[in-house]
Image (spheres, rainbow, N blue to C red):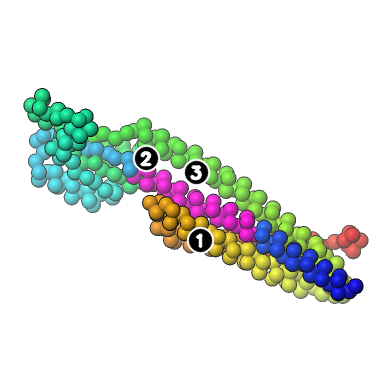
Amino acid sequence: MSSSFDKFQKRRLISSYFSVVLSVFLVLFLLGILGLFIINSQKLANDFKEKIAMTVFFKNEANDSILKTFGKQLKVAKYAKSNVFVSKEAAAKQHTDIIGEDFMTFLGENPLQNSYDIHLKAEYVEKDSIAKIEKQLRANPMISDIVYDKQLVNMVNDNIKKVSMWILIISGFLTFIAVLLINSSLRLSIHSNRFIIKTMQMVGATKAFIRKPFVMRSIKLGMLGAVLAILALLGVLAYVETSFPDLGILNDKFLIAVVLLAVLGFGILITWLSTYFATQRFLNLRTDDLY
């Protein structure tokens, strides 16, 4: 009879441990996915910003020396990520390929101008920053015009701000749910040992002495759940990198490492705090309230 009861207790204990590890794993996995999405969404947003080109057109009087000097200035300019020189001849060929006929045959001359397509760094693709850069470039007397899609710049920045706000709200909501789920699982685990806690207290054990083994056990379970979540996240990263190599999801290894370490740290912290307060609750209860 005693053996059957011991087996039942052992199965119940294993089931309790399993539920804690599973809760920690699922919650931390979801939070880790959200963290990876956040760091890569910023990268994708920056890549999109840097694809918006600012085209600088030069007057016909601008000779090769002036054009080359301007190109050298762009290479050292802090706002320029990359630049491409488009000669008037190359521009004419592009137009011919697009419209399907040589427009110069009936115009008699090439009306296009030499130009530079400048791709700005993401932090400079802002309304005020671009306006300053445009003003600075227009001070060059050889520049005839500067063209870029102002509406697209404003729309991109507005949408990025909206998306960032919603990501922040969702992150806070998921974190709150994560804390509740892990806390509930650990409280149920501690609840099954409430009589052991009270018995140890009645024979003179201090609160710190009673609390220590429960806290240490929960931290180990939290670490196990966090490690499983990290392994699952690495699997997701490997799958995405293999299936969509153009995304370059593994390029920023430092931020990925930060997210994975945050998952581990959060798993340890939340299990420690939840167990601490759960055991404290039962330690402060009267014996009659345990039933």
Tell me: residue 152, above or below residue 9: above
Secondary structure under the numbered disc 1 in the rendered image: helix
Q: Earlier in the sequence, mark 2 or mark 3?
A: 2
Horizontal side of residue 235 vs 250, given as left or right: right
Give amino acid for label 2. Glu
**How far is the residue under mark 2 from the one under mark 3?**
16 Å
Image quadrant assignment for residue 85? top left
Image quadrant assignment for residue 142? top left
Tell me: residue 105, above or below residue 134: above
Question: Which residue is under mark 1?
Answer: 234
Question: Which residue is under mark 2?
Answer: 126
Q: Position of residue 229 (x, y in %)?
A: 58, 61
Q: Residues within 10 Å of mark 3 (few under 14, many from 20)?
A: some
**How far is the residue under mark 2 from the one under mark 1?**
35 Å
Disc 1 vs disc 3: which is toward the camera? 1
State the extent of the magenta-drawn residues as a range: 24-50
As drawn, the residue found furthest toward the top would be 106
Which residue shows up at 37% across the image and 47% down it? 47
Give amino acid for label 3. Ser
Which quadrant holds the C terminus?
bottom right
Image quadrant assignment for residue 195? bottom right
Question: Which residue is under mark 3?
Answer: 164
Q: Is residue 34 magenta?
A: yes
Tell me: residue 291, above or below residue 4: above
